[in-house]
Amino acid sequence: MPEVHDIIIVGGGPAGLTAAIYASRANLAPLMFEGFGAGGQLMTTTDVENYPGFPDGVMGPDLMEKFRAQAVRFGADVRTVDVDRVDLSSRPFGVWADDEEFRANAVVISTGASAKWLGIDGETRLRGYGVSSCATCDGFFFKDKDMVVVGGGDTAMEEALFLARIGSSVTVVHRRDEFRASEIMARRVLEHPKIKVVWNAVVEDVLGDGAVEGVEVRDVVTGETRVIPAAAMFVAIGHTPNTSLFTDVLDMDDQGYLITDGTRTSVEGVFACGDVQDTVYRQAITASGSGCMAAIDAERWLEAQH
């Protein structure tokens, strides 16, 4: 059997790297597989202005590099390789990466969640330059500007209402003729004086050179297209938790998020933190906080086992 580590961390965004920092300082010598998506969603974010300690803001990738350097400084073994499969049926738990087997007495899962995108060219070209999936993260940059929100669920309603406090106007583009959001959220949007709704429409393109200038939409009934002038477009069509490794292994909700009690999963000795189990906040600061919690929970659990 290969060497048994105290703890293996799967995933390298804010949650996983914070867990690595705390586990390292607890002399647990964590082995982390950050994967090729290392850094998480912050790697596609330009200015981060809401993370404490950076009064002038910080670039998302720069912030993640600081997280990583701090974890390595305290002794975390961080490897940029994806985990292929896991065996959580018995301890020490098995983790395979690049066809190599690793074992650990405890596992922390921090694989995050991926925002769903529309899949159009302009969206990719202008992501981070007016195209975003997080109003709380990026809305402030478009104060007193016209903005577009794409989606019809509760998340889209929340984004639109948040942005309406910041911008001059918000246009919600929805492909159907009624929202799928809860009645109370839909009513708040429909009654808001700064929010307009474009029904039965899909986004065809995002216009602008280096920054968003408008959103081209197509009416799915008539086929007509028009451009909505806007400085930003927020895509709010949901997130997909990165939990395919743990299907039929750990308890999940109907969306695929890991179900946790604090940070404890349905398997004793396996902990989860960050967006992989957070359906509400999805912020770097909350992910980091839960990473700290997972590391402390794992440390105390390991101590109890010994």
Image: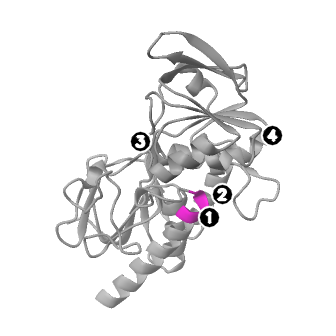
In the image, what residue occupies the spot 43% across and 29% down? Answer: 176
Dot 1 amino acid type = Gln
Between 41 and 96, the one lying in front of the other is 41
**Tag 3, which secondary structure?**
loop
Which quarter of the rendered picture does the C terminus lie within? bottom left
In the image, what residue occupies the spot 70% across and 41% down? Answer: 193
Judging by the rendered image, the residue that carries numbered circle 4 is 144
**Of helix, strand and loop, which mostly describes the magenta segment?**
helix
- Do callouts 1 and 4 mark residues in contact (Cβ within 8 Å)? no
What range of the chain is rendered magenta?
283-287
Give the vertical position of 21 relative to 284 (above or below).
below
**Tag 1, which secondary structure?**
helix
Q: Indicate which disc residue 180 carries.
A: 3
- Do callouts 1 and 3 mark residues in contact (Cβ within 8 Å)? no
Dot 4 amino acid type = Asp
Task: Indicate the position of residue 2 as horizontal and vertical percent values.
Answer: 25, 65
Which quarter of the rendered picture does the N terminus lie within? bottom left
Q: Indicate which disc residue 70 carries.
A: 1
Dot 3 amino acid type = Arg
Quadrant of res 30: bottom left
Judging by the rendered image, the residue that carries numbered circle 2 is 66
In the image, what residue occupies the spot 49% across and 75% down? Answer: 293
Task: Indicate the position of residue 149 as horizontal and vertical percent values.
Answer: 59, 36
